[in-house]
Amino acid sequence: MGRTGLFDIEKHFAFYGAYHSNPINILIHTLFVWPIFFTALVILYFTPPLFNSPQFGFDHGLVFNYGFLLALTYALFYASLDKKAGSLAALLSLFCWVGASILANRLGFSLAWKVVLAAQLFCWTGQFIGHGVFEKRAPALLDNLLQAFLMAPFFVLLEVLQTLFGYEPYTGFHATVKAKIDAELREWQSRKQKKRS
């Protein structure tokens, strides 16, 4: 589609997809990626506000803090990558911020950090098992931390949309990305063979 650099959706998905080709690993990530994002927003609720926001006459629990900034960054990035699925991912990101803020406000810090720690440990353990046992390849975050964290929620959403509805950002997207993933996997297998011999 002519996009390059940060907004090259094919490049992002080929990179991420090369680390997630096993169906069980994909399922594990589908179940655990968004909860990791959500619980990160829960703990970020307790960061200081970026500016004083007006009260709307009730204690809504929404604070424009680092959690809001993170959710907004993800939302804007996803919406810029793809109009339809990106807008859905943007809405989900902002809904996560609202839900996480309400939950964190109700739990309070002393309970919230324990819930977040348990959820993060559970979800990350599941993902590392997915990579070690099923994918048999180290996670993408070991090669590109920022890209792995930024693309993971959008990647699993697009996987679900493609699987359930046949959605693709534009005609030929999945075929092009699959070809790039296959090429990367062949190259990775070749590097592995060279290391062994």
Image: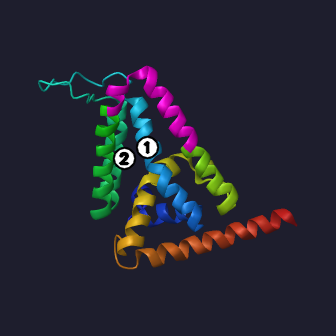
Q: Is residue 159 above or below residue 126?
A: below
Q: Position of residue 153 (x, y in %)?
A: 43, 53
Residue 107 sits inside the magenta stretch: yes
Q: Is residue 190 above or below residue 136?
A: below
What percent of the width, then of the height, locates residue 103?
A: 34, 33
Contact, CB < 8 Å: mark 2 with mark 1? yes
Under circle 2, the secondary element is helix
**Segment tinted magenta in the rendering:** 103-122
Residue 12, numbered label: none
The quarter holding residue 130 reads: bottom right
Q: Residues within 10 Å of mark 1 (few under 14, many from 20)?
A: many
Answer whether residue 99 is visible to the viewer in this image: yes
Frontmost residue, 148 versus 120? 120
Front residue of this view, candidates 24 and 85: 24
Q: Is residue 72 left or right of residue 115?
A: left
* Residue 189 in the image: above or below residue 40: below
Q: Is residue 104 above or below residue 120?
A: above
Looking at this view, name the residue that lies furthest to the left: 57
Q: Earlier in the sequence, mark 2 or mark 1?
A: 1
Query: Quadrant of the image for the C terminus?
Result: bottom right
Query: Residue tagged by mark 2?
Result: 74
User: Magenta segment, principal secondary structure?
Assistant: helix
Q: Separation of disc 2 and disc 1 at Cα?
A: 10 Å
The residue that appears at 66% across and 62% down in the rendered structure is 134
| Amino acid marked by disc 1 | Phe
Q: Which residue is mark 1?
A: 37
Magenta stretch: includes residue 45: no
Q: Residues within 10 Å of mark 2 (few under 14, many from 20)?
A: many
